[in-house]
Every structure is written in C-alpha cells, then in structure tokens.
Amino acid sequence: MVVLPLTAMAAPYAALVMDARTGEVIHQENADARLHPASLTKMMTLYIAFEAIEHGEIGIDDLVTISANAAKEPPSKLGMKAGQKVRLRYLIRAAAVKSANDAATAIGEAIGGSEAAFAARMNRTAKALGMRNSTFKNAHGLTTAGHLSSARDMTILGRHLLFDYPAYYSLFSRTTVDAGGKTLYHTNRRFLNDYPGADGIKTGYTVAAGFNLTASAVRGQERILVTVFGGTSTAARNKRVAELMDMGFKKAPARVAVTRTSRPAYQGNAGISAGRAVAAAEPAAVLAPAPKRIIAMKNSLRPQPRPLPADPVQMAGLQNDIAAALALAASDELAEGDAEEPAPGTLAPKARSLPVAVDAGPAVAASLAAVAPVKPAAPRVVSRNSNDPREWGINVGRYGNRHLAERALVTTALKEIETLQGADRMVVVRSTGYDANFMGLTRDTADLACRRLQARNMNCFMVGPS
C-alpha cells in the first residue's frame, strides 16, 4: 500500500491581511468566498465559551459531562469516554491548542444544551459580529453540508477574540498546555516558533478545506492578522502566511489610533431551549449570580479591574497596562500548571509578546508619552506624623542601571495592576544602585501589594514616610 503525504490538492484558496489595530484590510483575495473553515470554527466556539464564563452561565471549573455524541467525534480528540466528567478549563485548552473535536462538542453541548442549539447561538453571534458569510452547523468544524465561512469572517472573528476577550487570548499562544494530566501540543507551534512576533491563533484542516490558518503577530506598536484558506500543506500554508504577514508589516503605518471592537449585546441562550450537560464542581467559592441562577465554582473568576479614572488622558495611559495585565492573568487562570516543554523535534518556545497596545483615540494620542511615566525621584519632605495617608510605597529591587530598574517597574505594574494602579513609578539613584519604587500608596495598599508580589516569589518591601 502506498501512503500519500498529507496534502490538500483542490481546496479553494482565499486570503485576507488586516491591520488588527484598525480593522483596515491591507490585502485580500477571494476573501468573501464561502469555504469550509475546518477547525477555525473553534474560534467561534471559544468566543461563546468566554462570553458564557464572563456572564456566569458556566464556571471555568464546572464539570462537564461528556455525551456519547461528543465522545464519538473523530480525531483530533482527547479520547474522552461518554459519561466522563471534565472541567471546562481543560476542554477549553484542548479545543484551543490541540483542536480537539470531542472537547469542542462538549463545550457546545454544555453551554447550548445540544449541538444544534449551540450552532444556532454561533450563527446569531456571527451575525452580531458582522460575519456575513458564515453559517455554522457544529462546534468543531468537521465538514458538514452548509457549514461555511470566509477568510474575511474568520479574520473579523480573530480580531474580536483579541479585543473582546484579551484575558483569554494569550491561551492561543501557548505551545503546550496541561489538560487534566495530559500534555497537549499546539497544532500551530511551528508557526508560533518560526515567525517573529507570532502569538496565535488557530489552525484548521480537512480534505475539503485544505490547510487553513488565522494568525496574529505583533512587532512594536503594529499588529497584523492574516487568514489563509486552502493551503496545500502545513509548510506551504505557513510560508504563505509568513509572506502575507511580512506584507502587512511593510504596508501598515508605524503608528495609528487603535479602534477597538465592540462586544455584541449579550443574549445568552435567549430563544434557545435546552438543558445543560454540566455537573457542578464542589463549591469553595460562589460566583456572583446570573439572573435566576447561581454558579458554584471551585475557583472564583478573576475579579474585573476597578473602574478607570474619568480623566481621558489618564485612561489612555492605563489601557495598555490593563490589556497586558489581563493577558497575564489569563495565562494563570486558563493555563495554570501548563508544561513548557516543546514537542520532540520542535523549537523551544520563545517568549510571547503582549497584546497590541490599546489607544484611547487620536484626541489623546499625543499625550500618551506623558502618562504614568517612570519618574525621577524628587525630594519628598514628609514627616512620619504626616496626615497624608498616601505617603507609603514599596521597593521591588535594586538594579545595576536605570534601564533595568525601569523595566522592573513596568513588569511589576503589569502583574499587579489592581493594587499599583495610580502609583508613581520612581527610580531612586543610590551609591549602590538604582532602586525601583512605587510611591503614593496608603500603608494598607502597600502592605497588600507586597504580600501579593511575594506570593508570586517576587522581591518586595514597604517604604514608609520619611
């Protein structure tokens, strides 16, 4: 028997290149052709999963009962058995990274109650996102009559995932994840490892579709999204995506005001009747209830960031920190305990870039450089009996040069945005080095910040009024 190489000989080709910051299309070819999306479909499945989690429909640690329908899905799959209970976080990881069809079906059934009901929600969501060429029949993307999308629609969806759910987007960049004791390797790890700045998001392959990929990469302030349908092999597809990425970075302006996407109005399963295939995990914390339903969870969802200041200039300066901090938080939330070893024969994973910087608009663009800078330490004349409660601070290390100290301040601010928001970042020059300090905190806030940083094995001690 002759075994032929895995190739797609006749799948139609389509492509679109987009500046992710603005949604501006840089290049397109057959971008609106309705084609088989294959596992790019799972981007929509995951988009709805993130929506459901944030609105309390289901908890990240709820146990999902695997149906016979999900268990019988063909590979790629986790190989779960009917009746098995699996935490939602593991199903999300498997669908995003391994592209597991049984995991995607289980997610859809858990949220929608049935595959058909979930597909109806997918179609409603697609319409709300402006995806005009998409019709979904299932949660996984295996070839089904009428299950179609386009390069433009999948690029639009990728951009919405990036902006609408930045706290979860970083999952798409992980080359490996742990799914309940199984180490899963990213189907897109070759491109993630080979293309500078690549950080997501999803591959797809069926005979009818060919080799598909929606990919994102960031360089400095620029971010490009590329979707290719109909590649003839993994290598050929990745090469073409890399060429289109290069074109995008060459043609995109270096600086531009970012236009964020808007989430569609939340409807949940309105108009869709079906029961959940979920068995609640043993509760240790309770999520704030959605209407008429309380979700019991082992781990509570990460709290939302505190409201931003009303001042538009300060808002603009904080947006970048918030987007990046949410991405870091999502890595902890969705990928806690993930392995970092690459698959045999692959390149070691490189450090991933943070999400695209978020701009509040041209009205404040000129002010961004002046917002929340690292300040040189000025003399502070404050007595220990001061009535000002915000004369405390924290020190996060002493460094050999100013650059290292400033970098430490930025990194720490991103990791501890909740307590350090609004603090002054200061580099204090001493004879023995450069101290990285956050000042302008209350004693309680400084104490809390240090305890939270120390829990992450980061150096921190309080600096009192003097």
Image (tube, rainbow, N blue to C red):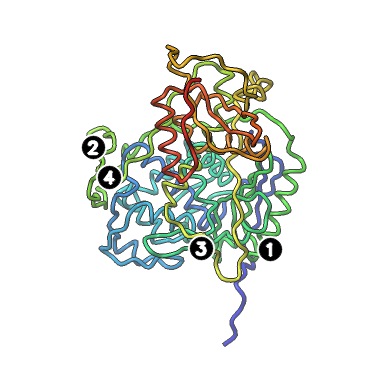
Q: Which mark is residue 143?
A: none
- Residue tagged by mark 1? 236
- Residue tagged by mark 3? 185
Q: Is residue 253 above or below residue 345?
A: above
**First along the sequence among labels 3 and 1:** 3
Badge 1, how many Cα within 10 Å: few under 14, some, many 20+? few
- Residue tagged by mark 2? 293
Q: Type of residue at label 2? A: Arg
Q: Which mark is residue 297?
A: 4
Q: Type of residue at label 1? A: Ala
Q: Which is closer to the viewer, label 4 or label 2?
A: 4
Q: Which is closer to the viewer, label 3 or label 2?
A: 3
User: In 3D space, how far apart are the residues under numbered discs 3 and 1 (Cα atoms)?
Assistant: 20 Å
* SS at badge 4: strand
Badge 2, how many Cα within 10 Å: few under 14, some, many 20+? few
User: In 3D space, how far apart are the residues under numbered discs 3 and 2 (Cα atoms)?
Assistant: 36 Å
Q: Is residue 118 left or right of residue 375?
A: left
User: In 3D space, how far apart are the residues under numbered discs 1 and 4 (Cα atoms)?
Assistant: 44 Å
Q: Type of residue at label 4? A: Met
Residue 291 screen position, x and y as percent: 26, 32
- Which residue is more in the foreground, 54 or 124? 54
- Which residue is more in the foreground, 1 or 234? 234
- Asked whether residue 132 is in view, the answer is no
Residue at 42% from the left image edge and 68% from the top image edge: 74
User: In 3D space, how far apart are the residues under numbered discs 1 and 2 (Cα atoms)?
Assistant: 49 Å
* SS at badge 3: strand
Question: In which quadrant of the rendered view does residue 195 lie?
Answer: bottom right
Q: Are marks 3 and 1 in contact (CB under 8 Å)?
A: no
